Image (tube, grey):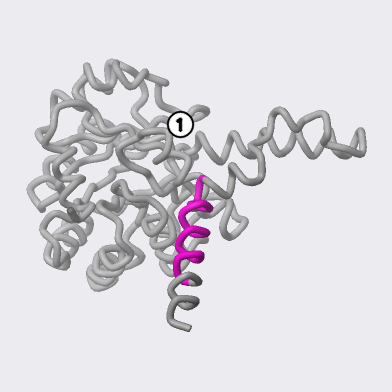
Amino acid sequence: MRTTARFRQLLAAPGIITAPGAYDCLTAAIIEQTGFPAVYMTGAGTSVARIGYPDLALATATEMLANAAAIAATVSVPVIADADTGYGGTMNVRRTIREYERAGVAAIHIEDQQFPKRCGHLEDKRVVPINEMTQKIRAAVDARTDDDFTIIVRTDALAVTGWDDTMARCDAFTAAGADALFVEAIRSPAEAAAVVARTGVPLLYNFVETGKSPLLNVSELERLGFKMVIFPGSAFMSVAYTVGKVMAELKATGTTAHLVGEMTPLTDAFELLGLTELLARDAGYAGIAAAAN
């Protein structure tokens, strides 16, 4: 089954979809093998890990697509990918949808920030007018060739223009064809509940450990009525912390021998990405060649 269809099944089935954030193929493989039903390709993590910049719209569409394609090729579960603002006007959005479809992801989210955008949990964001975003959404819906490809629309208006405008955007974005909504930087549990009560399509919650939103447990989010929750920073922020500690130990002691117990063994790390299967396949080809000779 196509991952787009599998993701639609997840949306239709009971329960919340928990999708931790991957910034590369290794983190995506770990997420899948831990048993999560979907992987989220984080734009912030992609920017930080792939091109070495903070999340300030410096990652291009090409760079984001390359990461999305690599991650989608690594895992078998559906991938939800960050597509920023769609990278331009309606024609750019059309191309963005087609390219993300070709990359093999199951769903994307596009947002209503003005370009250059920034991480949704930073200050001084700006949003485009509602009618400009609804045009982009219609272009996105028209552009997809797979009806199961899921278009999630994010609004950053809550921190910019307030509650009433945010709700007006949710109504307009749903009418324009959004399959799901993502209200960024929700500020309290009460506000989270109010967003669910006010909207009629599946909702995504963004769990950012050091961000602006309350750190509600997955079970609590499900009880409130959210259908999806992403954890975009959990992996790359943990890696930054852990690698920082390891490098400090190495600098101070001249060895990492005492940290071996805290590391995944080399062959186990390779195994996460299919070492045994690949070696067996290679040996099989060698056996076929030997038999032919």
Q: Say left or right for 267 vs 9.
A: right
Which quadrant would residue 91 be assigned to in this image?
bottom left
Q: How many marks?
A: 1
**Residue 20 at least partly seen:** yes
Residue 12: in magenta span: no
Residue drawn at the location 17% of the way across and 53% of the way down: 1
Nearest the viewer among 73 and 293 is 293
Residue drawn at the location 37% of the way across and 44% of the way down: 40
Residue 282: in magenta span: yes
Residue drawn at the location 27% of the way across and 33% of the way down: 17
Would you place residue 34 above or below residue 110 in this image? above
Q: Position of residue 226 (x, y in %)?
A: 22, 27
**Magenta region's main secondary structure?**
helix
Q: Say left or right for 250 vs 58.
A: right
Which quadrant would residue 200 be assigned to in this image?
top left
| Dot 1 alpha-carbon crowd within 10 angstroms: few under 14, some 14 to 19, many 20 or more | some
Would you place residue 24 above or below residue 235 in this image? below
Which residues lie in the magenta part? Answer: 272-285
Would you place residue 142 above or below residue 71 in this image? below
Q: Position of residue 157 (x, y in %)?
A: 31, 40
Nearest the viewer among 4 and 187 is 4
Q: Position of residue 250 (x, y in %)?
A: 85, 38
Residue drawn at the location 30% of the way across and 69% of the way down: 99
Q: Amino acid at mark 1?
A: Val
Q: Position of residue 249 (x, y in %)?
A: 84, 33
**Which residue position holds label 1?**
208
Would you place residue 273 above or below residue 183 in this image? below
Nearest the viewer among 285 and 207 is 285
